[in-house]
Amino acid sequence: MSLERMLRAQVRFMDLDRKLLAVTEYLIGNVNENGYLEISLEEVCSKLCISMTEAQLGLKVLQSLEPPGVGARDLRECLLLQLEGRFSAVPPLCPVIIRDYLEDVAGGRLKKIAKRLNCGIDEPREAIHQIRTLNPHPGLAYSAADPLSFNPMQELSKNRAGTNSRLSSTTR
């Protein structure tokens, strides 16, 4: 099932008024295969002739759907949305590191992060470990990868006359 179809199916079971449902479905139609929203809320307001408050409500509904992180507008928001949905304890530095030090995490600058946060190295290390368990592309699990691919194989067989070779194909 595609990401869009799965999101639309979830929305159908929600008790939303017609306008909020329409806004949410419009937003769903603007989510890319990675799960990110590709349209600004200003554009949504303009295209649907709605207020920013109505667009934000639709976004809130979209971001409440599965998979966690869907409907985010950037990587930081995607990761923060996933943290909000966690039932297990999240190290308190996780949101701070995501908001302010993501480039340093990518660059492996753990000592710099610890120094700026005025803490020991273990606290940011633990937070970074948790951050690395998050999915930066929540929609990819539902992307429509090529459902049928052609994989040529050479089969070798040996008989009394010698070795035979034939090309066969497999599909998945």
Image: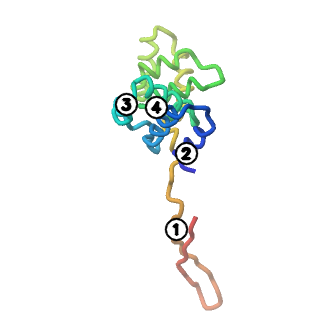
Residue 112 left/right relative to 88: left
Q: Earlier in the sequence, mark 2 or mark 3?
A: 3
Q: Earlier in the sequence, mark 4 or mark 3?
A: 3
In the picture of the structure, the residue carrying the numbered disc 4 is 72
User: Tag 4: residue type?
Assistant: Ala
The structure residue drawn at horizontal position 42% and vertical position 29%, both measured from the top left corner, is: 106
**Badge 1: few (under 14), some or many (20 or more) residues near its Cα, within 10 Å?**
few
User: Tag 1: residue type?
Assistant: Asn
**Badge 4: few (under 14), some or many (20 or more) residues near its Cα, within 10 Å?**
many
| Badge number at residue 45 | 3
| Badge number at residue 140 | none
Establish if 28 lies above or below 89: below
Establish if 140 lies above or below 132: below
Q: Earlier in the sequence, mark 3 or mark 1?
A: 3
Q: Which numbered disc, 3 or 1, marks the residue closer to the eye?
A: 3
Comparing 18 with 107, the one in front is 18
Q: CB of mark 2 within 8 Å of CB of mark 4?
A: no
Q: What is the distance, in whole Å, between disc 4 and disc 3 at their CAs?
A: 17 Å
Indicate the secondary structure of the residue bearing disc 3: helix
Q: Earlier in the sequence, mark 2 or mark 4?
A: 4
| Badge number at residue 151 | 1
Q: Position of residue 150 (x, y in %)?
A: 51, 68
Residue 23 left/right relative to 155: left
In the picture of the structure, the residue carrying the numbered disc 2 is 141
